């Protein structure tokens, strides 16, 4: 019974180490040996939990997505307009983290550019989650073109991530929040 807990914690240690290294240094640039060295986990243990590096990357991205999905579901205001604008507040907080290195999903899609690759598809699913969040809130508000407006809001959010990565984090998310507020007012919401 006690052996299942250490295995779980070793898996979590591998996953957290991989999450950090992939995010900071890239998916292709980070080798398995580096993950093993930084986590202190044996290679046999790694392959007990993950059959390949791609499987580890998928698990890391799934974990990052799950954490973000949880923050969105738990931390958003109930009122739809406020929830939309709160997404930009959350982005601002994300940019202010000391280890901000851009968007792990944008990086994954860029490194695994073949749209049929499972890692690229997983990154696209994450972005679809964001669009769906916006569309759901807009539908709750009674927007006339919720899908189109959701995409426009997402373009703002994605632009924040890219520009903060390119130029360094500043007030990109707050400025995008103002633009989102203008879009909503322009749509009568």
Image (cartoon, rainbow, N blue to C red):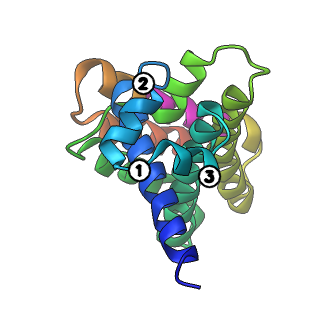
Residue 102, x across and y down, in percent? 38, 31
Which region of the structure is painted magenta? 150-160
Label 3 to label 1: alpha-carbon separation: 11 Å
User: Image point 24% across, 36% down: which residue?
Assistant: 171
Where, by quadrant of the figure, is residue 52 drawn?
A: top right
Of residues 26 and 147, the one nearer the viewer is: 26
Q: In terms of secondary structure, where does tag 1 sit?
A: loop
Q: Which residue is mark 2?
A: 26
Dot 1 corresponds to which residue? 41
- Judge depth for marks 1 and 2 and give the one in front: 1
Name the N-terminal-most of marks 3 and 1: 1
**Residue occupying the far top of the picture:** 114
Q: Is residue 33 left or right of residue 7?
A: left
Tell me the tag on residue 98. Answer: none
- The quarter of the picture where the N terminus appears is bottom right
Q: Who's the residue at 48% across and 25% down the image?
A: 27
In this rendering, position of residue 52 left or right of residue 171:
right
């Amino acid at each position: 019974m006690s052996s299942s807990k250490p295995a779980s914690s070793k898996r979590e240690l591998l996953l957290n180490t991989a999450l950090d290294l992939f995010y900071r240094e890239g998916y292709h640039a980070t080798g398995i040996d580096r993950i093993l060295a930084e986590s202190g986990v044996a290679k046999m243990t790694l392959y007990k939990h993950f059959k390949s590096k791609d499987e580890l990357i998928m698990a890391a991205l799934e974990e990052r997505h799950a954490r973000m999905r949880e923050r969105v579901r738990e931390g958003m205001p109930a009122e739809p307009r406020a929830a939309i604008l709160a997404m930009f507040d959350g982005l601002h907080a994300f940019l202010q983290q000391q280890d901000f290195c851009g968007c792990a999903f944008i990086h994954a899609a860029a490194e695994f550019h073949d749209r049929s690759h499972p890692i690229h598809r997983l990154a696209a699913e994450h972005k679809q989650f964001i669009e769906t969040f916006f569309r759901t809130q807009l539908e709750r508000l009674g927007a006339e073109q919720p899908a189109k407006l959701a995409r426009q809001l997402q373009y703002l959010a994605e632009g924040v991530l890219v520009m903060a990565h390119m130029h360094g984090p500043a007030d990109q998310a707050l400025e995008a929040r103002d633009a989102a507020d203008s879009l909503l007012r322009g749509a009568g919401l």
